[in-house]
Amino acid sequence: MDEEANTITPKTIFIDGHEIPFKDGQTVMDAALAAGIYIPHLCHHPGLTPHGSCMLCTVDINNRSVSACTTPAVAGQQISNNTTALNEVRKIITQMLFIEGNHLCPSCEKTGNCTLQAMAYHLGMLDGHFPQFFPRREVDASHPTVMLDRDRCILCELCVRASREVDGKNVFAIAGRGITAHLIVNSPSGKLADSDLETGDLAAHICPVGAILIKEHGYEVPIGRRTFDLHRVGEIGLEKVMLAKTRHTDE
Ligand code: SF4
Ligand code: SF4
C-alpha cells in the first residue's frame, strides 16, 4: 500500500453522520475500528482475512445492507451502523446462534469471557426466542491440553483462519453446509490428539465462545474478574485483552 498517497489524498466515509478517514485497501470495518467506532462482530479479527459469515456487522450503505468487514471503504459512503433497526436484526442473529447450539452459560467455563454472551447482553437479548435445536455434536477431549466442544461452535472460522494464516498449519476446517455444517479436524483420525495443534497456537486461543478451551485452567479466573466483567464488548482493541486472558498472561 502507498502510505504517502494515503496521507496526501484525504478520503472519508460517514458512519452515523460522523466523518472518518480511511486508507486505500481498508474495509468499512477497518476504518471504523481505526476511528474508534464499534461495529458489532463475532467472526472478524484484525489481521485475519475477513470472512463475512456471522453477519453481525451488517450496515446499511446508501440503503443497501452489506457486511462492514468485507466491504471496501469508498469515499463519500453514507453508512448507518448503530440504529435501532440494525441492532434488532443483530439481536435476532444472536438469538439464532444461541438456539443452534447448546449454550448453557452458567455451566460453561467461557462465561464472562465469551463474546457471544457479551453480544447478547450488548444487544439486550433476553431469551432465545426461537425453538432450541439441542444438537448432539461430537466433543473431542483427545488432545492433552486443548478440548473441542462442537455444541458451542458458532462456525465463525476464526480457528480455521488463525491456524492457516498465523500458525502456518491447517488444523481446522468446516465440513457440510447449512444445518449440517460442522467443524472438523485435519488429522488421520479426525481427532485433535493426532493433529498438529499445539497449546501456543493462536488457533487454540482465538475462539470467541467456549468451543475451544485450554485444559487444566478451568474456573481459575473467578466471576467478577473475567473479560466482560471489566470491559464492554464494544471496546476497541479488546482482542488483545481476550487473548491474554486465554493465554493466562494477565493474571
Ligand atoms: Fe454461554 Fe458463551 Fe459458553 Fe455459549 S460459549 S454457553 S454463550 S458462555
Ligand atoms: Fe469459531 Fe470457535 Fe467454532 Fe472455531 S471452534 S469455528 S473459533 S466458534
Image (cartoon, rainbow, N blue to C red):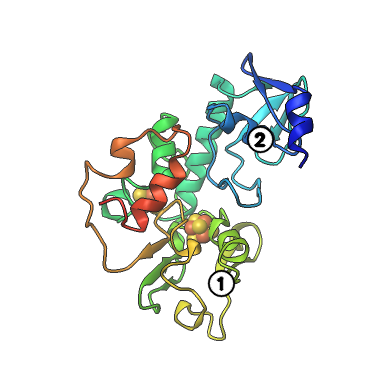
Residue farthest to the top, as pictured: 17
Amino acid type shown at disc 2: Ala
Binning the other alpha carbons within 10 Å of mark 2 as few (below 14), some (14 to 19) or many (20 upward) gives: many
Question: On the rendered structure, is 158 left or right of 99?
Answer: right
Amino acid type shown at disc 1: Val
Label 1 vs label 2: CA separation? 28 Å
**Which residue is identified by label 2?**
68
In the figure, 70 relative to 65: above or below? Answer: below
Question: On the rendered structure, is 132 left or right of 183?
Answer: left
For residue 103, say whether it is visible: no
Disc assigned to residue 171: 1
**Percent from the top left, x then y, of residue 87?**
53, 27
Identify the image quadrant of residue 21.
Answer: top right
Question: On the rendered structure, is 74 left or right of 107?
Answer: right
Residue occupying the point 49% across, 61% down: 202
In the figure, 4 relative to 177: above or below? Answer: above
